Amino acid sequence: MQRDDTKRETGSSGKRFAGDEHAESQPVPRIPYPISRELHVPVLLHEALDFLRIQPDGNYIDATLGGGGHAQEILKRLGSGRLLAIDRDPNAVEAARVKLAEFSGKLMMQHGNFAQIDELHAASGLPPVDGVIADLGLSSMQLDDASRGFSFNLPGPLDMRMDPESETTAADLVNRAPERDLADIFFELGEERHSRRIARAIVKARPYRVTTELAQVVTRAIPSRAGLHQIHPATRAFMALRLAVNQELENLDEFLGRVLTVVRPGGRVVILSFHSLEDRRVKQAFRRWQGEGRATILTRKVVRPGEEEIRSNPRARSAKLRAAEKC
Ligand SMILES: C[S@@+](CC[C@H](N)C(=O)[O-])C[C@H]1O[C@@H](n2cnc3c(N)ncnc32)[C@H](O)[C@@H]1O
């Protein structure tokens, strides 16, 4: 698969970054295929399916198709019912088309943003559905594909867009955003204590084209007792950039504002989040729905994966599941 680097090298507006002359002497590594071809392991699968209470003749939406793990299990339980599966990442939709080919009669797939769930649902022609699942964040395939630029461990272009058609790349932000805006991103979205130091160091060492260059600068900017960190020192900064590039919290807010309109009374909404800022939004929206008599919360306590699941799938460790039923 060939990548078109033109947009990444010049930024989404087509303008060149300050200092690009230097950047041109350092070619971006070309890694045409994901290093790991392992598929995404679905998190809290049994719990999510139990809350969705799949009926063979029911209709469902998987708002975050990803590796198709949750979708596949829903499809196995469907008889005459149908599943609308959505993903912002066209690669995910294409990969799932192959993986889920045997279910093509009951599967409708749509490349799109769940922020427009009401429009995507209307376009599908399905009646109000019996359940919606959203499993937020990144899939393992996205993270392990160096050419997508999500990983601080793999050298790749600083991209981080889930939807390659969206405008802003991570390179646009790190090479052009004012220092203060970068610090705000790291502080607010990454809950990073060293946000100002990191932003200062990043601006000083501009420009960047490769993920690992940025990861090195971030790591050096963090005080040396960071050796005590349990996670890689660049984890929070990379996560914050990804959330900003993809406007993930804004999209989640839109989704939470619209999702009940596509669900039938008695239908369910199940959301898995991996970030405290996401989970807080879900919790608050569910409480609001309950307070307004629009839904009943099914998870009085948030559902977390057990030790065994975390051992076999470390990505699950920060997962939180919440479910609600429309009144
Ligand atoms: C954690 S993965 C889902 C994994 C899936 N449940 C499985 O079992 O394989 C999250 C997926 O959601 C997609 N995604 C994230 N934000 C989205 C949005 N706003 N609209 C649609 N898809 C989104 C990502 O591209 C990614 O493929």
Image (cartoon, helix red, strand yellow):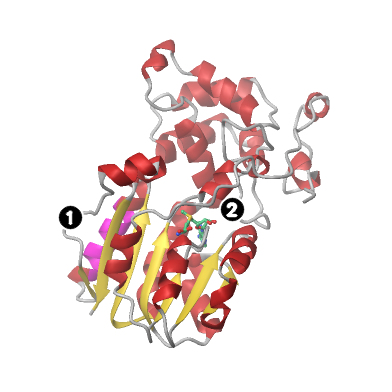
Q: Does 197 sit above or below residue 267?
A: above
Q: Farthest residue toward the top?
A: 224
Q: Considering depth in this image, is 262 or 64 the residue closer to the camera?
A: 64
Which of the numbered marks, if any, corresponds to residue 118?
Answer: none
Give the x, y percent position of residue 36. Answer: 60, 42
- Is residue 47 covered in magenta? no
Q: Main secondary structure of the magenta part?
A: helix
Q: Earlier in the sequence, mark 1 or mark 2?
A: 2
- Is residue 288 covered in magenta? yes
Q: Considering depth in this image, is 279 or 196 the residue closer to the camera?
A: 279
Which residue bears the numbered disc 1? 301
Q: Secondary structure at mark 2?
A: loop
Which residue bears the numbered disc 2? 162
Q: CA distance from mark 1 to mark 2?
A: 31 Å
Q: Does 208 sit above or below residue 197?
A: below
Q: Image quarter for residue 148? A: top right
Q: Secondary structure at mark 1?
A: loop
Give the residues in magenta.
280-289
Q: Image quarter for residue 110? A: bottom right
Q: Is residue 86 left or right of residue 60?
A: right
Q: Is residue 8 left or right of residue 228?
A: right
The amino acid type of the residue labelled 2 equals Met
Q: Does 281 sit above or below residue 160?
A: below
Q: Does 302 sit above or below residue 94?
A: above
